[in-house]
Image: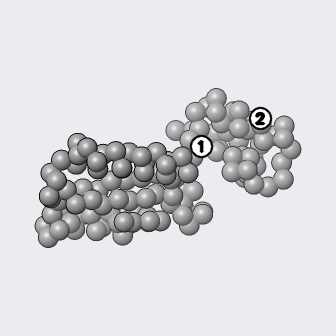
């Protein structure tokens, strides 16, 4: 996994400068920004969402818990599948990640695991 430190070493800029170029903040020349962005692209850089969440205090992660007890079909359900896939496309285009959690047991061990995931993952939105 390529880091901003790898990009900094490859381009000769400092890690903070690379970070500013990649986030579009700070005062950098267009040439510097383009050089860093091109290097990041060539090196296959993808932002670390956990690290970004620590600095921005936002995870950009949406958790959806759905009750599948009655349907027992999950994403195979004709209406449910279309609605969730459309929603997924919309939120991903806005820069969010999405996680689907199937709630099949609200009293057993699965429910406890689901609650721990919600509390520890730092979701911005949970519905």
> Does 125 sit left or right of 104 as displayed?
right
> Does 74 sit left or right of 90 as displayed?
left
At mark 2, the secondary structure is helix
| Quarter containing the C terminus | bottom left
Q: Is residue 50 above or below residue 44?
A: below
> Does 45 sit left or right of 7 as displayed?
left
Q: Nearer the viewer, residue 42 or 92?
A: 92
The residue sitting at 54% across, 46% down in the picture is 93
- Determine crowd level at label 2: few under 14, some 14-19, many 20+ residues with C-alpha closer than 10 A: some
**Res. 106 mark:** none
Q: Could you say which quadrant of the image residue 33 lies in?
A: top right
Count of number-bearing discs: 2
> Residue 57: where, in percent of width, then height?
56, 67
Label 1 sits on residue:
3
> Residue 121: where, in percent of width, then height?
40, 63
Cβ–Cβ under 8 Å for marks 1 and 2: no
Label 2 sits on residue:
35
First in sequence, mark 1 or 2: give its number. Answer: 1
- The label nearer to you, 1 versus 2, is 2
The residue sitting at 36% across, 49% down in the picture is 83
> Residue 9: where, in percent of width, then height?
70, 38
- Determine crowd level at label 1: few under 14, some 14-19, many 20+ residues with C-alpha closer than 10 A: some
Q: Residue furthest front?
A: 79
């Amino acid at each position: 996994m390529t880091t901003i430190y790898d990009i900094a070493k490859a381009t000769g800029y400092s890690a903070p400068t690379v970070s500013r170029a990649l986030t579009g903040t700070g005062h950098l020349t267009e040439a510097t920004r383009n050089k860093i962005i091109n290097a990041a692209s060539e090196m296959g850089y993808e932002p670390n969402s956990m690290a970004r969440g620590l600095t921005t205090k936002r995870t950009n992660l949406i958790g959806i818990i759905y009750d599948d007890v009655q349907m027992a079909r999950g994403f195979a359900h004709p209406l449910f599948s279309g609605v969730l896939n459309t929603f997924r496309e919309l939120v991903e285009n806005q820069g969010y990640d999405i996680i689907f959690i199937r709630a099949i047991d609200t009293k057993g061990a699965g429910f406890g695991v689901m609650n721990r995931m919600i509390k520890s993952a730092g979701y911005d939105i949970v519905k």
